[in-house]
Image: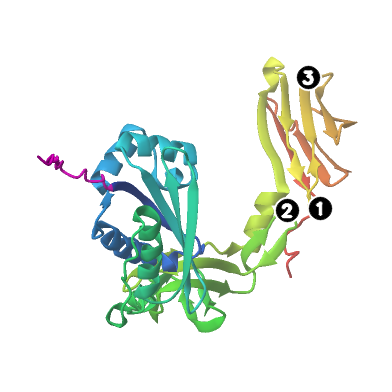
Amino acid sequence: MAAALIFVCSILPAQTKAPVRVAFLSIENRSGDPRYDYLSGIIQGILLYDLASTSGLEVVERSQLDQVLREQELRLGGLAEDRDRALQVGKILGADTLLAGGYVFLGAEVLLTATLIEVVNARTAAFSERGSGENMIHALAEKLIQKLTGASPTLQSSQSNRSILSLRDETPGSIALHSHLIDAEIFLDGEFAGYTTGDERVPFLLEGTAAGQHTLRLRLSGFGVIKLPEVDFRDWEEKVEVKPGKRLVVRAGARFFNEILYTLSRLLDQDVRLEASKGERFEKSHEASFTDREGRLIPITLKLTASPAQDGYTVTAALSYENQAHPFALKARKGESQELKEKVGKVELELDLDCRYPQEVKIEYSLSRTDIWQNMWR
């Protein structure tokens, strides 16, 4: 009898491979120009859709990521730059891979880059695409999906290649420029635009201003800003950002040059009253250092002492200029008033001693810079 062989087959259910879990960190604008911030949302939205629609991939929900960031007291922007912290967050989320990216605006096109970071071993893989339409983003998504799953999807199509650059809101905005100057010339991006109203409450309106960055400038003889420490006289100028369809309120800080020069030149100004009948004394020290027009710090100290003398008062001043001592003294008899003016380096010491009143002695002293003066801008 022929032997019969019987084969028994055991059919086991096939094990399903777990999906790759991806945590999407951010897409950053690396152009340095906030006018292109809007591209971040467009790029991230398309990438998220492509990844979430792919079999074998699971994208971590943004709410989960935000919750972990709050618990760890982290910022999303800083997380993209700190790989160690990013990997820590990835492990908390149970993610296999982190995804971060950025873009640079190149005029007619955008250079888009993305980096995948494996949470287990911190290995990275970088990808890039360049273009101006949605297919650029789909092409990058194809590379990412192939790296993550091994699949080769086709996401690009002629029907889904709208320009992402044309989606920016180009609605013009406006600028309301407030200034106390009367009839100062206003320039927008170097072009004359009109004259200031002279009433801080009534702005000059620049309607229909294109959204984006602009330069405002005011010109009026004797008014503007002073650049320090050189003490250069310039028109007031400010770079502003106009939002689409919005009004930007700007308050010009142009001031009268002589007002600024007076403040800069007066290093010290004191007024003292002493009771002469009681023989009252006075002593005080001051520091009045300043940075000169060449950018050098000039250290100055002044110590003043006043005391009654025979038939009057005596004031001594010890002025230290760049660590060199310069002593001065002034005496006035009862019924007299004496003054002293001395220049040391780039400063001038003024001292007035008034003993004309029987009950009171008046002392006034000041330090002023001599390397700047009023009307020097003319």
| Quadrant position of residue 298 | top right
Residue 171 visible: yes
Asked if the stretch drawn in magenta spans residue 16, the answer is: yes
Give residue 229's mark. 2
Task: Classify 284 as above or below 129.
Answer: above
Location of the C terminus by quadrant is: bottom right
Task: Classify 121 as above or below 203.
Answer: above
Report helix, strand or loop for mark 3.
Answer: strand
Q: Nearer the viewer, residue 340 or 285?
A: 285
Mark before the other along the chain sequence, 3 or 2 = 2
Task: Classify 241 as above or below 20.
Answer: below
Range of magenta residues: 1-19
At 40% from the left and 65% from the top, the residue drawn is 140
Q: Which residue is mark 1?
A: 294
- Give the x, y percent position of residue 170: 35, 78
Pointer 2 with pointer 1, Cβ within 8 A = yes
At 55% from the left and 72% from the top, the residue drawn is 217
At 73% from the left and 58% from the top, the residue drawn is 231
